[in-house]
Image (spheres, rainbow, N blue to C red):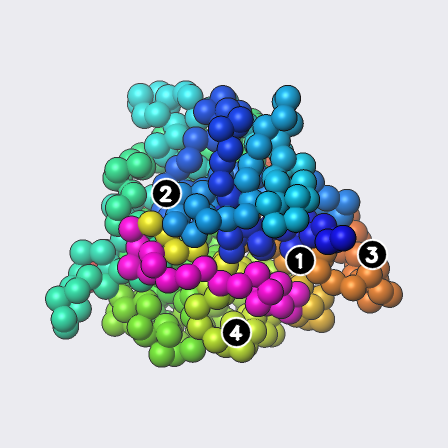
Amino acid sequence: MVAPLNPCELEIDLFCRGVRIDRSCSLEEDARVFRRTRAGLGSGLELVLPGGLKDIWMNAPVEEDFAQASPYRLVKEGARYLLLDERNSLRYPVRIPPEPAWYERRTTLGTPMQDVGVLQGTYLGIYISNSCGYWWMRGEGREALNCAFCTTGYNVGVNERVDKAVEDVVEVAAAAKAEGCTFTHFNTGFHGGRDLEMVAPYVAAVKERVGQLVGVQALPARPADYWKYDWLLDLGANHFSFCWEFQHPDWFARLCPGKRATLGQDAFFRALEYCQRKMPKGACSGEIIAGVEPIEWTLRAIDYITDLGAFPTVCIFRPCIGSDMEHVPSPRSEDMIGVMRHMYEACRRKGIPIGAAPNIEVSLIVQPDDARYLAPRDLRFWAQEARSWVVRRLAAPVFARELRPRAPKADPLHPPRPRPAAA
Ligand code: SF4
């Protein structure tokens, strides 16, 4: 008899194989609308996989070609949803998180709230403005400089509003917080070096008027502009993430041509090192995609990130419809299980806190605390569980303070140093 997968093995297999939706399902009533937003990763079906250590939130691919051949079929029996694995007839109960009530509302300015931000798991993701410049820049061969796995150029402004008013963002963040959301994450795309100035008013407004943890994902600043990170910290930013996606320089150059042409891979490393030095362990993250470059380079990236005391954010490659890599096969589950086990072990060995922040479940990735399911249940495992419990208790009052609205220590509209000339 085939043994059932544990929740993290199932999560990984679903990321790699996708899900087919049976006709018995009534997702239009039960599920969050599929939103093709940002880089395209959130375009699938939000699922919760229940488990003993924790429930796992994930965004399962449903639209892509590979998902049409998936052995997994989502079926509804009575009021319950199940994943049926047709290879072996195993059945996995799952939950479908309902659409947040605020998705149906409008802001005071009349903007549909779901055009402003999207819940990815339990956090609010907001792409603040005007897509990403790499989609409009041309390289030597006249081809666009967008990252090859990305679909942002097709989504922002079509499925999301291009121009996000600070007022709209504040109202949406407040509505999400009222339903339990603790974290708003801003993503800028490439804006010629003005990215951090653009995000500053949003960070300050959410910290001051809503009171949430706030993250910023932007292209790295030049060393001469690192003062902007200090400024954003004064405005209340809690997290910076840097996405270089591929550790091998050749894969980075080939698949992220805009990042290579305008910044270079080292810019990501130096900015992460600068920010992580200033912030508590695990407050910054390095983001990579697993399943494209040789696995040893992905493992090397995880080691580098965790050596810095930063948090590894590892996406499993998804060949999103419309991206340049649409027809590249999704990776093998066995390989991805090895990567995620390595990620968990690296966090454990280097003392990176996992699962410490309250109610942050990121459905686009395998979180290090999801990967606990992959570790052997030995003494080291239980020692780590005990350490995490203590860290959570010690961190709780700090996070409680961060979740209270507070005035920024700097002016979001007037940076402490002159703005550089627009690139
Ligand atoms: S930087 Fe790359 S991944 Fe990010 S939005 Fe631009 S093209 Fe997409």
Dot 3 and dot 1 residues touching (CB under 8 Å): no
Q: Which residues are magenta?
A: 322-343
| Nearer the observer, 77 or 309 | 77
Instruction: Compute the Cα span from label 1 to label 4.
Output: 17 Å
Give the crowd class for mark 4: few <14, some 14-19, many >=20 residues within 10 Å. some
Q: Which residue is mark 3?
A: 386
Which of the two discs, 1 and 4, labels the residue nearer the N terminus? 4
Q: Amino acid at mark 3?
A: Ala
Q: Amino acid at mark 2?
A: Thr
Q: Amino acid at mark 4?
A: Ile
The label number, if any, that marks residue 371 in the structure image: 1
Which of the two discs, 4 and 3, labels the residue nearer the N terminus? 4
Q: Which residue is mark 4?
A: 295
Give the crowd class for mark 2: few <14, some 14-19, many >=20 residues within 10 Å. many
| Residue 332 sits inside the magenta stretch | yes
Could you say which quadrant of the image residue 85 lies in? top right
Mark 1 vs mark 4: give the one in front: 4
Q: Which residue is mark 2?
A: 37
Which of the two discs, 3 and 1, labels the residue nearer the N terminus? 1
Q: In the rendering, at what x and y percent does residue 405 appear?
A: 54, 35
